[in-house]
Each structure stands twice: as C-alpha cells, then as structure tokens.
Image (tube, coloured by chain):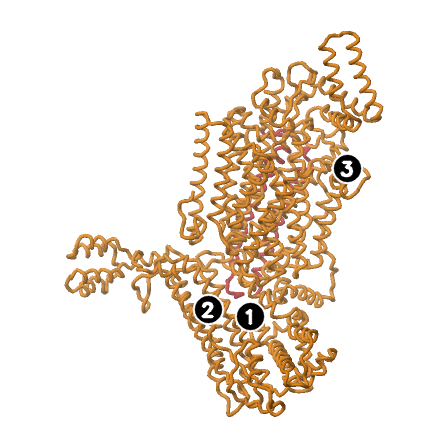
C-alpha cells in the first residue's frame, strides 16, 4: 500500500480534505484487497505443503510489518498531527479506528466464549458495551469535539478551571489506561506465543515492538491509520470462520439472521441432556468426588494420615496376597500419586471439591436470569441490569475512546463518527452471540455422544495445547463423550472455530492475527492516552507551559517508551488477576469521568470543587469496593473477614476467567467470593455529582466571582470576558461548550496556548485579585480592546497597561539601586548581601496587580506616578534593614524620564520578543503550510483584475510569506534604546555627588542589563527615534497583511476558497458552500486602526520641544492600544486562514474558461521560430473574443508555420499547466 | 453574541431529541431487560428477550446514533446563524 506517497507527508498527508478522503478510501480498498490476496496466497501455499509454523510466522511478520510501515509513513512531530491526527480523520475511518481501539483481545477472543459459558446472562456484555455508545453519541462526543482540545484532562481543566481538576483527570486517566494496557500487552504476549511458539516474555516484547512502531513515530496519526488497518484485519478474521460454520450448519452465510433456528435446536438438545441418564451418572460421580473431598478437608490431618495409611496397607496387602506384579504396581503407583504432605493434600482436595460445579445440570442457553427460585432469579436480574449499566457508563467514559472524537474534522463528523464507531463494533458484537450458539450446537450434537476412540482432530490438538482450554475425560468410563465430561475454556470458542468448521490452518493463523490486531490496537490507543496525559496535560499544561511543540512531542514519545516498557514489565510478571484489571479500568473510568464530563457539559452550575470531589469520591468508592470484595485485593489490604456481599453474575473480569476456571461449563452462576461480579456500587458512584454548592439566591454575584477566580487560576487570558460568556450561557445553555472560543478554534489551540502561556508567565498569579471587577469592566470598557476583544490581546496587558508600566518601573528602580550598590566608589552604599539581593529580585519578579494597586494608592497622595514607585519601594523594603538603610539611594540622581524610558523599552523588548514576533511568525508559518499544500494548485492570475498568465495558489501565498518574514526581520532588527543620564542627559546631579564614578559606564551597564542599548546622546528624554522605526516597521507589516486580507477576501468572493465552518455551533453556518470572509474583514479593520495609531506615534514621538515637552508621555500611553489593534488583526487573520479550504474545482473552472491566457507562450514560441507578426496575429485571435476554447486555440496553432514538435508542445499546454516555476517556488518557501 | 429566540429553540429541540432518544435507549435496554423472563415468546426462533439483548437492542442503538447524527446535522443547517456574530 506504500505507493502514492506525496512529498514528505506521505499518503496520510494529502492536500484538501476531500482529496484526502478520496485518497484514504482508495488506499484502504487496495489494502483490504491486498490482505485478502495474501490470505488466499497463504492458503494455496498451505495446500502445497507450507508448514504450519511458517504460516504463523508469515502472519506475524506481515501484519506487524504492515503496522510498522503505516507507523513509519505517518511519522510526525507536529502537535496537532501527533495528538489528534491533524483533526481530519473522516468519520468513517475514525469509526473503524475507534472500533479497533475499543475492541480488545477480550472482545475478540473472549466475548463469544463468555456467551457460550454464560448463555443469556453473558448478553450483558453485548448490550452494555454497545449501549454505552448511545451515551457517547448523545451526551459526549459532539460537545467534546466542539471544545476542540487534545485530551480529556484538557476538558476538565478548562471547563472547571484550575489545575486540580486537570490533575485528578490525569491521575484517573493514567489509572484506568495503565491497568487496561497491562492486560492488553499480556494478551499480545499470549497470542504471539501461540502464533509462533516463542517464550511468553519474548512474545510480550515482540508485541511491544509492534505497538511502539505504530505509536512512537506518529502518535495519534500513526495510531489512527494503523487501527483502521487493524480493524479490517480483525473483522475479516472474525467473520470468515463464523460464516463458514453457519454455512455448514444452516446453509445460509448470514449467521446473525438465522441462528435463531439453531438456538431452538440447542434448547431442545439441552432439555434432553439435562435428563439424560448417562449425563446424570457423570454428574453424580462429580458430586460424590466433591463431597468426599469436602469431607476430607474438614479434618485435614486425620484424613491425610488415614488415606496414606490405607494406601500403604493396600500395597502391603497386594504384596502379601501375591496378587501379581500388576496389582502391586498399581497399588504402589496410587501410593506415589498420593499428596506428599498435608498442604499438598489440601490443595488437591480443594480443587477436587470444586468439581461440585460440574455436578450441576447444563445451563439453558436462552433462559433469562436462571436461578433455583424466584429470589435467586431476582438477584440474577438485578445483577444483569447493574452490569449492563456499569459497562455502559464505563464505555462512555474511557479516555482513550473519547479522545478519538477530537480527531474528526468537525462536530458534524464527530456525530457521524460515533455512528460509524458503533456500527463497526456492532458488526462483531452482533455476530458473537451467533458464534456462541453455533459453536454450542456443534459441541452438543457432534462432540457429545462421540466415541472417545473417534474424537475429532481439533479436540486432540487443543487438549495438547492447553488442557485448561479443553479437556475431555471419560469419567464414567463408558467410552462415549458426555457433555458433563467436557471441560471447556471460553477462549477456545473463537480460536478453535476454524477447526470446528473444518477450515484450513491458514484461517486459524488469520484468527490469531485478528486477535493480535485487536490487542495491539487497543494497547496503542491506551499507551498514547497515558503518554499524552503525562506530556500534554501534566508536563505542558502544568509544569512548563512554554515548552515548544517539538519538545512536547519528543517528551510524549519518550514517555510512550517508558510507559510501554513499564506496562510490559508488569505484564511479564503475569500478575495474578490480570483480567480483574480490565474491569477495574472500566469501573474507574465510569466513576471518575462520566459524571464530571456529562455534568460539565449539561449542567451550568457544576463547578470546580464539585467536580474534583466527585471524581475523587468516585475513584475512592470504587477502590474501596474492590479492596473489600476482590480476594486478590482483600489480601493486599488486609481485609480478612469473609465477604458477605451478594455475589453477582458476570463482570468484565469474567471475560477471561473461563480460561482459568474451565470447570464452569455447567453454568453455575454462584461464584466463589473472589469472583465478585458487577458492582452496582460502581454504577452508584457514577452518580457522584458535584452538588456541593447549595443554591444561593443571594449569592449570585459571589458565585460569579468564585467561578471567575477558579477560572483565573488557569489564566484569565485563556478565556477572556468570562462573565459575558457566562451570562450568555445562563440565558442559553447551548453556549456552554463554547466558553473557550476566545482561545480559538481547535487547530489554533496549541499555538495560541503557547502565547497564552507566555502571557501567564509575564503576568503573575496575583492577577486573580484584579479580575474581580473585570466582569463589569469588560461590559463598560470604552475600548473594545478591553471589552469585547480583551481575551485576544490579553498577552499585551502585562506590558502596556498601567500595571505593566509600574511593574517595569519597579524593575528599573531596583536595577539602578543594585548597580549603585555594586559601584565601589559610592562608599555610602555598600554592596548588598546575597540575602538582600534575593529579596530585591523577589520583589521585582513577584510584582503583581495588588502591588500596582498600592502604588496607585500612594500616587493619590504624592500626585506623581514615578515618585509613588519610589515610596512604595521604601515601604516595601521597610522590613529588610539592609535595603531600608539604602532607601535614600532609591531613584538616586534620577529624573522620572530615566525610569520611564527604560520601562517603556523593557515593555517593547519583551512584547516584541514574546508576543509580536511569534505572532507574525505564526502567520508566516500558517501561510507557508497553505503555500505548500496548494503549491501545485494552478490558478488564474489577475493583473488589473483581468485574466492573466496563470500562477498557483501556493505561489501567491508564498509571496506573502516572503514579505511577512522580511518585515518580521526588519522589526527584529530595530535596536531598542534607553538612557539613564539625569535631568537633561548630562549626568549633572550624578557628577556633582560622586565626581569619581564613571557614570557613563555605570549607566550603560544598567541599560544593557535591562536588555536595551544605551543611547549616549539624549535630552531629558530618550528621543524615541527607535520607537518610530519600530512602529513604522510594524505598520509596514500590517500594510502587507491588509493587502493579504483583501486578496483573500477577493478569492473568497470568487469562490476560490470556501470557508471550513465549525458545524454544530449556534451562530455558525453549516452550509459548506457558504462563505463568510468576516475574519479577514475584522483583520483589515483592526490593522487599519493599528496603522493609524502606529503612524501617528512614529511621526509624533521624535518631536519634543527643546529639551522636553510632555506630548510624548501622552501618546506613549497608547503604545499598547496601537500594538493591541495590530495583534488583534493578526489573530483574526490567522483565525480566517485556519478556516480556509481551497475549492480546486472552482479554481480549475476559471482557468478552463480562459484559454486566451495561452496567447503569451504561443507568441513567445512564434517569435522563437520567426513567425511574422506574432503579436498582431494573436491579438486578432484573442482581442474582443469571448469563449476562446481549446479547440479554437489548437486550430490556430495548427495553422502556424512551426516545427511539429513545437506545435505538439504548444498543444500540450493548458492554462492549468502553464504555471512556469510557480509550484517549485511555492514549495521552496 | 446576541442570543435569539432561534438559539433557544435550537437548544431545546436538541435537548428534547436527546431526551427522547435516551428514553428509547432506556426502554430497549432496561425495561426490556427487566422483563426478560416475561418476554420470552418465540420471535423468529429466538426467545424475544434473548433476541433483544443479543441483536435487537444493538440495532436500536445503531439506529439511535444514526438518527441523532442526522437529526442534529439537519438542525444545524436549519438554524443556520451568521458566523460573524461572535468574531
């Protein structure tokens, strides 16, 4: 399938969504065909005598190699690709991937066996595991997709605010995924071993290799496409044997629709077998043996001694009686076989006593809730329904499944994707009950009643492979197989079906490969969930929000390795109760996630602490229940008293149990305590609602503040005018999933997240206290920058607000103070000790809005803003004697402007480096991606608005990339200057106080220390010329972007671009053809505002009368406004770009309607060959004519006196092909 | 963002449909499940309750999800509101 690679992005990186979908469909059609051919080829080879072991190896190598191939082709280190497969997995394929992700080895191998063993009660798994998807579809998937992040803890973190819900989410996600993944890797080891015969531990690590090549290189992208491949294999592997068996038994290849008749026959046969005398005889023997063993166990030591003595006596008697060598030998053997000591005897007898289970009559397969009386049936029913409920809720809350719905391109596709998920899961689950019944029928009619001498081949071979899967012993020694004599393990149903149906060995290999695919795909998804929880949610969102994309993806990959190895190590220990872990994963997920997610979506009053406590309570109660009811855990937690709980039928853990407790064929549904079944408790905790907050009629406002504060912990910048959104939600609940809209549509979330994160670093957490009034401020703000758009420009407020200015001033004052202290010539101010220095640094670093508010309060009395900072510093350091003593050196010899110009410089330097340049580069990189994608999309150029020589869409965008990057470089090159030289720039006061100090050098050092360059020649003010340069450069960049805004607007208007709309949102169009260039219009408007201000600043700032007037101070207060409008324009532009989707058909249509553009190449070629009057000839042909076509042009060419090859070359041209080097140029950018 | 009557209508339609489908889901699963012993009449060879738990409910689930996706995707179109309202 590795053929149609396109550039570096491979087959999973095609251009437009539609082309991508078509390509993917083609690839998987070929793939499915290829796989079927592979099976047929193997089957032929088998007939030609290929050894079975080879078939196993070939399957293993071919499938794992295939997955590895997809993994390698899908390698990526882009965050959106790595975490959510670029959000462009079509619904159908996401459905397949989810199906594979969901169906583990337990579903594939264990399900039919469980149904075989449990009959009706086993159907709880079928219903529960599919019905859960209704909850996913109706309550979760579309809303999560709309939210558009990367992981489930992301949702919790943003919906409830703060890191605690996120952290609890991370813990729960890891807890359930890790327990689950251990079970999957265990299954991988088992199947690999079975397929190839290698050691179990080696099998685990072989399988692990298979898992890692899928997920390691390409994250979600690789996992998704491998899972699709795995789904195809597993469904083929599941269907072939069942269909074959169905044809054999019923003559119809649709087992799902005809097995009702078979079920009737099975039911009739059961009735016979229940009262069959021979069966009764065998069951009596078991009953007797179990009773004997139980009796012996009652007085262990005595029975052990008695038994041994009796056997010894028998040997002696045989010898004494001369009973013959045979009899003596037999007696001796019996004595040797006797348990060596009392402990061994206890184990043996305990095992024997369990035979009681086999003394029960066979289960009636179709009977609902069997039981000996009504009370037992009632318990059975309740357990059944509780299990169904628990499985449904668990299904709807598994993070590795929910995460998948983030990968669809839209909400609409998310809804369809759930449908396809369930559909593909349904195919298997719909078939499993049929398989169980068909297999049962075969066993009941073909196997039961057969003579031991003529057992079918498959029975012998499976008895040899693993007696716990199948063992038949002639208990009553009549030479005929009775049902009661068969001990069968659930796993064999799927594994042996090919042989039961008489299919070639290659199908058995196929089934094992299917099981492997199921286990690998689930393990892949789980590992990725864990690695993402750690790298994305924990590392990136909580530890280091500045981490670059590449770094995060790298960390995720490393974690993936570590987690995979850890899981493999645990699995290699063969933990005693591995399948208990599977069920634990479901219960944990149900209890921790379901309520928090669903209520977070549908209940506006669900809040942070409610969610946290709800999740913790859910986990805690589940854990407590397990600890007290599971023998395995009871041991660990020292719970010794017997469990008196009602034991329940069925449990996810039971899926695998039959393998081990093969004796339960009889359908006894009274479990040993260790088998505690479904836990209504889990289901109960599923309702652990965050209801801690009482309704407070009068507390409405306070609650808003609480919510706001909780939100702000995450960073107010993330979500902006929260209260407005909140208000909107109150009136309109549907809005709730959009509260993070300000953070941008999904595809931008990551990049913007970084910008937010940066801003968060700049603005200390004390912002919390400021936000209390922010609700109102947003409503009443005069400027939209502080109201409507506050969230988008929040990053700038830390620098250019009043608070930002004060903060930077504090930093300057302290830098000056420390520099003075370091200067030895200033003897009155000794250098600060390390402690004092640390304290000073702390004050500078931790300066928050609350501090700024205090400075403002002081200003009210001093009436001088810079002086207020000085007073505040004195006040602040009153408690630090060493600094307090130096108080008079704060602001020493400074003029206010010394402090202000440096504070402005710092603000510009930091904003340029952290906000402006990254934002511009982000635009360039978005454009570059578009340019690359559309490098080859030929498009009609329009000089003067008229059709002209074609170009490509990508090349046009590449032009802008080059322009934007050039301007970014210009902006970056502007030197940022500062001065610290007193009232008129001559160090007058300085020199007067300390004539010996080299003030120029000291000043230069301070200025450089703040990240600026010293301007040695100034008046009272730094003349601001550099600011003019900077603002001019920004304005020029804006002008170019306005040009782009208008061009894109025009292309949208021509229909060249459609807009990718976010379906499902109120306020959004879902009509694919509907185009709305609002983002570009918004951008154009805001950039215009920005340039008006920036240009005025650039013209105004260099002018200051004589040594100083105050006009600069006045306009400088608006620096942030100017840059804010610029940033706003850039953000809107990117928002618009992210939604663009080219319409190649529309673009091509325009080209095709303008064949006259080929006049240029024809004319040029005519000139080359010296044809007379080329221009005039063509002019005559093209001018004024409409409807120039390929035909008319070809007729013209044919009429020219040109060499044949030149004619052919010209005739081969079409407008779409006449793009020169455009594609190459676009790709190179 | 101006919240119009249209939005409220859209949301309440969504809620109503979600509620209705959840009811269908509940009946098909839990009500039928609860009365499994009583509902064991012959249904094309299967006892009805067995069929429901093994096949019928699955079909209903698939249809529920298909229908919801279709209904909501149509509703989105029907209640199309200008994208630019919250730029």
Residue plotted at (48% across, 85% down)? A1102
Marks 2 & 1 on one chain: yes
Residue at label 3? A646
Foreground pick, A698 / A494: A494
| Residue A1129 x/y as whole percent | 49, 70
| Residue A214 x/y as whole percent | 52, 46
CA gap, disc 2 and disc 1: 18 Å
Foreground pick, B81 / A810: A810
* Quadrant assignment for the C terminus of chain A: bottom left
Q: Earlier in the sequence, mark 2 or mark 3?
A: 3
Residue at label 1? A793
* Quadrant assignment for the N terminus of chain A: top left
Numbered disc 1: what chain?
A: A
Residue plotted at (50% across, 91% down)? A1105
Residue plotted at (73% across, 64% down)? A697
Q: Earlier in the sequence, mark 2 or mark 1?
A: 1
| Residue A1127 x/y as whole percent | 51, 71
Task: Classify residue A246 as left or right of residue A768.
Answer: left
Numbered tag placed on residue A1081 in the rendering:
2
Badge 3 marks a residue whose secondary structure is: loop
Residue A795 image-quadrant placement: bottom right
């Amino acid at each position: 399938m590795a053929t149609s690679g396109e550039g570096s992005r491979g087959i999973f990186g095609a251009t437009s969504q539609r082309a991508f979908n078509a390509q993917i469909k083609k690839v998987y059609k070929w793939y499915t065909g290829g796989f079927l051919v592979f099976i047929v080829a193997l089957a032929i080879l088998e007939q030609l005598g290929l050894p079975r072991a080879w078939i196993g190896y070939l399957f293993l190598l071919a499938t794992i190699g295939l997955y590895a191939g997809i993994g390698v082709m899908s390698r990526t280190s882009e965050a959106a690709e790595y975490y959510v497969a670029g959000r462009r997995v079509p619904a159908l394929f996401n459905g397949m991937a989810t199906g594979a992700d969901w169906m583990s080895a337990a579903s594939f191998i264990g399900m039919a066996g469980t149904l075989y063993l449990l009959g009706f009660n086993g159907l709880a798994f079928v219903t529960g595991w599919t019905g859960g998807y209704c909850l996913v579809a109706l309550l979760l998937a579309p809303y999560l997709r709309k939210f558009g992040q990367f992981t489930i803890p992301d949702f919790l973190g943003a919906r409830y605010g703060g890191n605690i819900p996120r952290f609890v989410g991370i813990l729960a996600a890891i807890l359930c995924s890790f327990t689950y993944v251990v079970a999957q890797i265990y299954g991988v080891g088992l199947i690999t071993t079975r397929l190839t015969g290698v050691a179990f531990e080696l099998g685990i690590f072989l399988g692990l290799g298979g898992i890692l090549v899928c997920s390691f290189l390409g994250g979600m992208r690789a996992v998704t496409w491998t899972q699709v491949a795995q789904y195809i294999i597993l469904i083929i592997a599941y269907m072939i044997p069942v269909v074959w068996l169905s044809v054999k038994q019923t003559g119809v290849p649709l087992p799902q629709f005809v097995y009702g008749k078979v079920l009737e026959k099975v039911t009739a046969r059961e009735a016979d077998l229940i009262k069959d005398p021979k069966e009764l005889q065998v069951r009596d023997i078991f009953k007797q043996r179990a009773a004997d063993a139980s009796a012996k166990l009652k007085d262990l030591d005595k029975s052990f001694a008695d038994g041994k003595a009796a056997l010894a006596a028998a040997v002696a008697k045989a010898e004494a009686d001369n009973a013959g060598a045979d009899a003596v030998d037999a007696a001796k053997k019996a004595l040797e076989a006797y348990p060596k000591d009392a402990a061994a005897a206890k184990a043996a007898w305990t095992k024997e006593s369990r035979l009681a289970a086999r003394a029960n009559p066979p289960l009636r397969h179709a009977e609902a809730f069997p039981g000996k009386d009504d009370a037992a049936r009632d318990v059975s029913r309740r357990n059944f329904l509780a299990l169904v409920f628990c499985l449904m809720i668990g299904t709807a809350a598994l993070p590795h499944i929910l995460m998948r719905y983030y990968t669809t391109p839209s909400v609409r596709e998310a809804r369809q994707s759930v449908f396809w998920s369930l559909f593909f899961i349904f195919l298997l689950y719909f078939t499993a009950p049929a398989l169980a019944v068909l297999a049962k029928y075969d066993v009941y009619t073909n196997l039961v009643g057969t003579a031991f001498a003529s057992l079918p081949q498959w029975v012998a071979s499976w008895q040899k492979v693993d007696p716990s899967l199948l063992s038949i012993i002639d208990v009553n020694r009549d030479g005929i197989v009775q049902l009661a004599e068969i001990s069968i393990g659930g796993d064999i149903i799927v594994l042996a079906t090919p042989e039961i149906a008489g299919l070639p060995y290659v199908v058995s290999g196929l089934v094992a490969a299917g099981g492997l695919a199921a286990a690998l795909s689930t393990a892949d998804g789980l590992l990725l969930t864990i690695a993402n929880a750690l790298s994305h949610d924990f590392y990136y969102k909580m530890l280091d929000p500045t981490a670059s994309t590449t770094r995060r993806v790298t960390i995720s990959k490393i974690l993936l390795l570590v987690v995979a190895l850890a899981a493999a190590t645990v699995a290699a220990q063969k933990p005693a109760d591995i399948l208990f872990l599977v069920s634990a994963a479901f219960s944990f997920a149900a209890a921790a996630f379901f309520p928090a997610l669903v209520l977070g979506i549908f209940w506006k009053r669900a809040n942070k602490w409610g969610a946290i406590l709800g999740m913790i309570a859910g986990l805690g109660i589940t854990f407590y229940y397990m600890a007290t009811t599971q023998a395995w855990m009871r041991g660990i937690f020292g719970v010794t008293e017997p469990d008196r709980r009602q034991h329940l039928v069925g449990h996810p853990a039971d899926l695998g149990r039959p393998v081990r407790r093969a004796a339960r064929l009889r359908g006894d549904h009274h479990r040993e305590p260790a088998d505690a079944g479904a836990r209504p408790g889990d289901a109960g905790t599923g309702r652990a609602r965050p209801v801690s907050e009482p309704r407070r009629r009068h507390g409405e406002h306070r609650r808003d503040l609480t919510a706001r504060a909780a939100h702000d912990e995450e960073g107010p910048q993330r979500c902006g005018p929260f209260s407005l959104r909140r208000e909107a939600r109150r009136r309109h609940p549907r809005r709730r999933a959009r509260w993070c809209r300000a953070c941008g549509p999904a595809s931008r979330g990551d990049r913007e997240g970084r910008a937010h994160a940066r801003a968060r670093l700049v603005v200390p957490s004390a912002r919390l206290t400021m936000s209390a009034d922010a609700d109102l401020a947003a409503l009443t703000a005069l400027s939209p920058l502080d109201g409507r758009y506050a969230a988008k420009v929040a990053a700038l407020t830390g620098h250019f607000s009043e608070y930002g200015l004060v903060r930077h001033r504090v930093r300057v004052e302290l830098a000056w103070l420390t520099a003075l202290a370091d200067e030895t010539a200033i003897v009155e101010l000794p250098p600060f000790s390390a402690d004092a220095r640390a304290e000073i640094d702390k004050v500078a670093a931790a300066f928050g809005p609350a501090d700024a508010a205090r400075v403002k309060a002081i200003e009210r009395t001093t009436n001088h803003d810079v002086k207020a900072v000085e007073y505040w510093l004195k006040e602040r350091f009153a408690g630090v004697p060493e600094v307090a003593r130096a108080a008079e050196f704060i602001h020493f010899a400074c003029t206010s402007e010394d402090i202000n110009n440096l504070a402005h410089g710092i603000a510009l330097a930091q904003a340029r480096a952290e906000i402006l340049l990254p934002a511009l580069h982000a635009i360039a990189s978005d454009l570059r991606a578009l340019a690359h994608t559309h490098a080859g999309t030929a498009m009609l150029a329009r000089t003067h608005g008229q059709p002209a020589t074609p170009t490509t869409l990508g090349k046009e965008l590449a032009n802008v990339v080059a322009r934007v990057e050039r301007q970014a470089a210009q902006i970056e090159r502007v030197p940022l200057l500062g001065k610290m030289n007193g009232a008129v720039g001559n160090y007058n006061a300085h020199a007067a106080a300390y004539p010996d100090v080299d003030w120029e050098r000291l000043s230069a050092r301070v200025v450089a220390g703040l990240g600026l360059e010293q301007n040695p020649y100034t008046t009272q003010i730094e003349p601001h010329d550099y600011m003019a340069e900077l603002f001019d450069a920004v304005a020029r960049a804006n002008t170019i972007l306005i040009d782009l805004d208008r061009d894109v607007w025009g292309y949208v208007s021509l229909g060249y671009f459609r807009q990718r709309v976010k379906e499902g949102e109120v306020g959004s169009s879902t009509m694919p053809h509907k185009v709305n260039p609002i983002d570009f219009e918004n951008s154009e408007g805001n950039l215009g505002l920005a340039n008006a201000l920036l240009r005025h600043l650039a013209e105004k700032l260099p002018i200051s009368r004589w040594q100083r007037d105050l006009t600069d101070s006045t306009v400088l207060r608006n620096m942030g406004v100017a840059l804010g409008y610029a940033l706003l324009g850039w953000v809107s532009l990117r928002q618009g770009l992210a939604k663009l989707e080219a319409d190649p058909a529309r673009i091509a249509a325009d080209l095709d309607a303008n064949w006259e553009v080929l006049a240029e190449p024809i004319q040029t070629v005519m000139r080359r060959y010296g044809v007379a009057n080329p221009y005039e000839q063509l002019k005559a042909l093209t001018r004024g004519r409409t409807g120039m076509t390929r035909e008319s042009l070809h007729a013209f060419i044919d009429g020219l006196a040109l060499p044949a090859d030149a004619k052919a070359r010209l005739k081969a041209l079409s407008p779409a092909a006449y793009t020169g080097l455009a594609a190459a140029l676009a790709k190179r950018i | 963002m101006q919240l119009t009557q249209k939005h409220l209508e859209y949301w309440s339609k969504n809620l109503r449909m979600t509620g209705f489908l959840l009811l269908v889901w509940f009946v098909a699963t839990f009500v039928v499940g609860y009365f499994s012993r009583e509902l064991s009449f012959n249904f094309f060879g299967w006892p009805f309750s067995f069929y429901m738990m093994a096949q019928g409910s699955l079909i209903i689930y698939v249809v529920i999800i298909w229908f919801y996706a279709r209904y909501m995707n149509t509703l989105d179109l029907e209640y199309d509101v200008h994208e630019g309202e919250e730029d």
